[in-house]
Image (cartoon, rainbow, N blue to C red):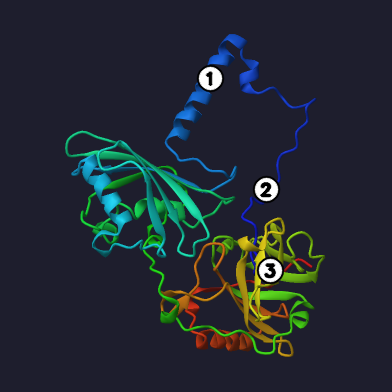
Amino acid sequence: SNPLRRRRTPNSKPSPVHSHSSPPSPTAMLRPSLALPLVVAAVALVSARADNCPGSKAWVHAKCSLTAAFPENSCQEVAQEIIDRISGENGWKDPHNQGVYTLTSGGPTTRILTTQRVTGNNKYTDLQKWTLNGEGNSCEVEACSESQVFSIKDFSTNYCDLHDLYCGSQDGCPVAKKDFKYTETFNSCSQNDKSQCVASAVAAGDCKAVTTAKNFNLTQFTAKKWYIQQQMEVAYLPKDQNFCVSAMYNDRDPGLFGWTIAVTNKAYESDKTSKHQGNLCASEDSSDDPAKLQVAPCFLPKIAAGPYWVLEFNDEEGYALISGGQPTMQSGDGCKTGSGVNNAGLWIFTRKQTRDENLVQKVRGLAQAQGFDLSVLNDVDQTDCPV
């Protein structure tokens, strides 16, 4: 959890390996004649499962594998509706932030379809594979979507990649021609929140254009530690880490990719002993606005960075309002950013760790004046924190 952007990596450390003291594995304890068939069977099982997914270039990545059953429609009807939605028939548009689908292989009468979806901001591509099985007027579809970059938590994006191409009125989804009845069974899809699948992004003109801090001084901003008092939940900032969240910035050698700021973000769980730390890099973006920064893991080039804009900053009063770029999604009484990795997030910073409610309310008022939906902000507990 970090107010810029933390790498979506597990926090647990790998178990140490002791080659001389580790107990033998259960397979190693079997006689060779028994162990080999088990290994072969295991490989075959993994291969069979992998065949139902499109694959990914990233060794660690988010995915969703599910089975959708259509008791009243043939596989040809299901495939045709998927293709019609991809083609934009009857004005159909992706309800999950205006992504763009492409049919990469297959057709209405083939058993297998492959597709891809590019996110609305054109930064990320997910691949999908659809295996249709059925006879007569019923169809069962084994569907799988996989991210193509390093990722762990995707806020149900891969699930929505699949769901939005067949869901209908029973889940509040727009259709191209056919409105199906269906059930879903999840095979490997821990993030499957339907509420994330119908959230239309709007044109930037429909949300108030935010303004950045006037006369912004980056040196002043990065000179001292910041404490986060409220923040929006996004893919890398779960609510269960809204404890003792802080951010510290230091100058660094630009290195290969030109990052000039080292970022250290810390957060804790409710026990206030389980710490999560993210080490990232930042720099000014390519605009002429010094308050528009960009952030990413230090090993990535700037093309992979996400926006980090300082909208309000008063060093004397000790506060700052930060946004993950321009909000583009209508929400509640205003607008919000996305909830993924880049182009996501809203934070209220203060220099003092002890919460000043009047100051927090002042910054909330500044955020509201910028057109933000304040309901996305969650409190951060800054009491009894580790030194």
Residue for badge 3: 244
Amino acid on which the number 1 mark rests in the picture: Val
- SS at mark 2? loop
At 76% from the left and 77% from the top, the residue drawn is 222
Toward the viewer: 166 or 155?
Answer: 166
Identify whether 279 is placed above or below 69: below
Residue at left offset 66%, top offset 84%: 356
Please tell me whether residue 109 is drawn above or below residue 43 in the rendered image.
below
Number of the front mark, 3 or 2: 2
**Residue 112 image-quadrant placement:** top left
Mark pair 3, 1: CA separation: 49 Å
Q: Secondary structure at mark 1?
A: helix
Three-letter amino acid code at the position of disc 3: Cys
Q: Is residue 178 left or right of residue 148?
A: left
Q: Please tell me whether residue 185 is drawn above or below residue 334 in the rendered image.
A: above
**Disc 2 residue type?**
Ser
Question: In 3D space, how far apart are the residues under numbered discs 3 and 2 (Cα atoms)?
Answer: 19 Å
**Residue 152 showing in the rendered view:** yes
Quadrant of image for the N terminus = bottom right
Image coordinates of residue 380 in percent, x first then y, are 61, 72
In the rendering, which numbered label is found on residue 40? 1
Location of mark 2 (residue): 12
Which of label 1 and label 2 is nearer to you? Answer: 1
